[in-house]
């Protein structure tokens, strides 16, 4: 094992090379700190990373991503690193799959023409959704259940038709205890135009890597941190082939992974509190097709049927031009699952076999056009925002010179790249101060 120590001031280790870790490293290096990044996998980017197939000149993200027009932190970072011209915003079509049909659901006019939805129900639904969207965040929302309050605002009919199946498909058994704050944030952040980067979000990952290394930062791939020890005023990170000392350490890995490593440095009350936090896994298959799967041009298709094994179908190339992907149609199908569920143990062929009958309900002949497909999983992906979550939410600082950030730190907002960037910068500022 390699043994290193040094006496430099402000030597910082960041565990995790996703967007939070990379953004934090970028800011800290610019403030004069010496920074090392440890990433357990063979590449950077976390769940924002991309991949390429032969003939593609853009990468596709391993999980579907886009930005909203109000995502200020992400937009500011992109501008700082010289990629402003790469970020474009596009109009797109959202639909729902209801009673065997793909129905457009992007505009008020389309919602008003939705079948089996009474006129009064539509008015209530529009009023309640608008009320929540334009309301400021109120602390009291944390203690209120979305499943109890939102039907009173938007009508029981609209809630049962739209929001109940979506909540159930995303959160499973926890659907009726999700905080109204989460639903508020979900509606509040939406925008009519969505953003994507020319080349895929991997372009930003690569630019941050370049900036960090040019400024003297070290990036260690395939370097899993197995434990962390406190030695007087410093911290020692230990892996299979390394042991190094640092003044400050930041964990920017998924919450469950970080928790295992920092658990012994938590107070008993914190251990009990964080043990109550529920987390879901996610997976999606990414299909490559010769022709579009959603032939009406829909980008995002929400499934209003809880029998389906996935919550959404996202046709990436109905959002950006397929010419960047050798003329192929790129389609995602996926959802959120209990980490111990059978589907999280399946390989790509078994998942595809599980999904195929349901995909055929949307496009009967899609398999004739199928070129290939890939499977991607994230074991710790979605915090379950229960009504008690505000009391459970972790602080960014664990103890002296030990910090962490994850998607579990963004409440009341939902997970997303903008908040990964924002929280990475927040932790960086805490250390600089």
Image (cartoon, rainbow, N blue to C red):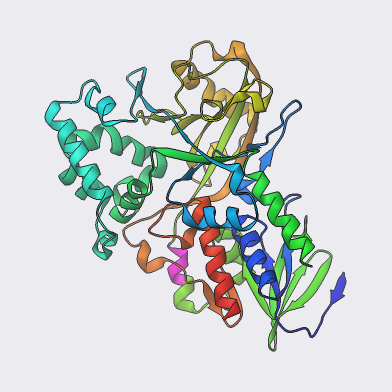
Q: Is residue 212 left or right of residue 125?
A: right
Q: Which residues are magenta?
A: 272-276
Assign the C terminus to one quadrant of the image: bottom right
In magenta segment, residue 210: no
Residue at left 73%, top 52%? 41
Q: Quadrant of residue 430?
A: bottom right
Spot occupied by residue 427 in the image (x, y as percentages of width and height): 55, 70
Spot occupied by residue 99 in the image (x, y as percentages of width and height): 32, 19
Residue at left 56%, top 35%? 284
Assign the N terminus to one quadrant of the image: bottom right
Spot occupied by residue 241 in the image (x, y as percentages of width and height): 84, 65
Q: Quadrant of residue 32?
A: bottom right
Residue at left 21%, top 37%? 126
Foreground of the two, 352 or 102: 102
In magenta segment, residue 274: yes
- Image vertical order of residue 263 relative to residue 280, above or below: below
Characterize the magenta stretch by its predominant secondary structure: helix
Foreground of the two, 155 or 291: 291
Q: Quadrant of residue 265?
A: bottom right
Q: Is residue 44 visible?
A: no
- Image vertical order of residue 327 relative to residue 392, above or below: above
Foreground of the two, 220 or 262: 220
- Image vertical order of residue 125 relative to residue 360, above or below: below
Q: Is residue 129 left or right of residue 169?
A: left
Foreground of the two, 24 or 118: 24
Q: Is residue 296 visible?
A: yes
Spot occupied by residue 3 in the image (x, y as percentages of width and height): 86, 75
């Amino acid at each position: 094992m390699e043994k290193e120590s040094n006496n430099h001031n402000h030597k910082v280790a960041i565990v995790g090379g996703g967007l939070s870790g990379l953004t934090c490293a970028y800011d800290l290096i610019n403030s004069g700190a010496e920074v090392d990044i440890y990433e357990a996998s063979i590449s950077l980017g976390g769940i924002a990373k991309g991949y390429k197939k032969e003939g593609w000149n853009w990468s596709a993200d391993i999980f579907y991503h886009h930005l909203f027009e109000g995502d200020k932190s992400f937009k500011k970072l992109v501008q700082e690193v010289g990629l402003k011209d790469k970020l474009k915003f596009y109009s797109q079509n959202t639909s729902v799959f209801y009673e065997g049909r793909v129905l457009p659901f992007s505009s008020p006019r389309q919602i008003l023409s939705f079948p089996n939805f009474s006129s009064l129900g539509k008015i209530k639904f529009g009023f309640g959704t608008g009320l929540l969207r334009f309301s400021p965040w109120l602390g009291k929302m944390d203690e209120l259940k979305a499943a109890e309050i939102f039907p009173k605002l938007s009508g029981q009919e609209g809630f049962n038709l739209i929001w109940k199946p979506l909540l159930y498909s995303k959160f499973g058994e926890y659907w009726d205890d999700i905080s109204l704050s989460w639903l508020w944030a979900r509606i509040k952040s939406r925008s009519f135009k969505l953003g994507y980067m020319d080349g895929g979000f991997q372009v930003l990952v690569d630019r941050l890597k370049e900036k960090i290394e040019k400024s003297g930062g070290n990036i260690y791939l395939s370097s899993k941190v197995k434990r962390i020890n406190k030695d007087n005023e410093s911290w020692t990170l230990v892996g299979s082939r390394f042991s190094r000392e640092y003044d400050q350490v930041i964990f920017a890995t998924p919450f469950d992974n970080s928790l295992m490593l920092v658990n012994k440095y938590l107070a008993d009350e914190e251990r009990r509190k964080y043990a109550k936090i529920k987390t879901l896994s996610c997976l999606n298959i990414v299909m490559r097709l010769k022709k579009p799967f959603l032939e009406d041009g829909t980008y995002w298709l929400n499934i209003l049927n809880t029998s389906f094994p996935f919550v959404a179908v996202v046709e990436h190339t109905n959002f950006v031009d397929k010419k960047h992907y050798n003329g192929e149609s790129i389609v995602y199908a996926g959802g959120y699952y209990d980490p111990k569920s059978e589907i999280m143990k399946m390989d790509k062929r078994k998942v595809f076999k599980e999904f195929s009958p349901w995909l055929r309900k949307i496009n009967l002949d899609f398999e004739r056009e199928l070129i290939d497909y890939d499977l991607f999983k994230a074991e710790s992906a979605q915090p379950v925002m229960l009504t008690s979550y505000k009391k459970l939410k972790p602080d960014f600082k664990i103890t002296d010179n030990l910090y962490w950030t994850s998607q579990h730190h963004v409440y009341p907002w939902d997970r997303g790249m903008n908040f990964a960037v924002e929280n990475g910068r927040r932790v960086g500022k805490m250390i600089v101060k």
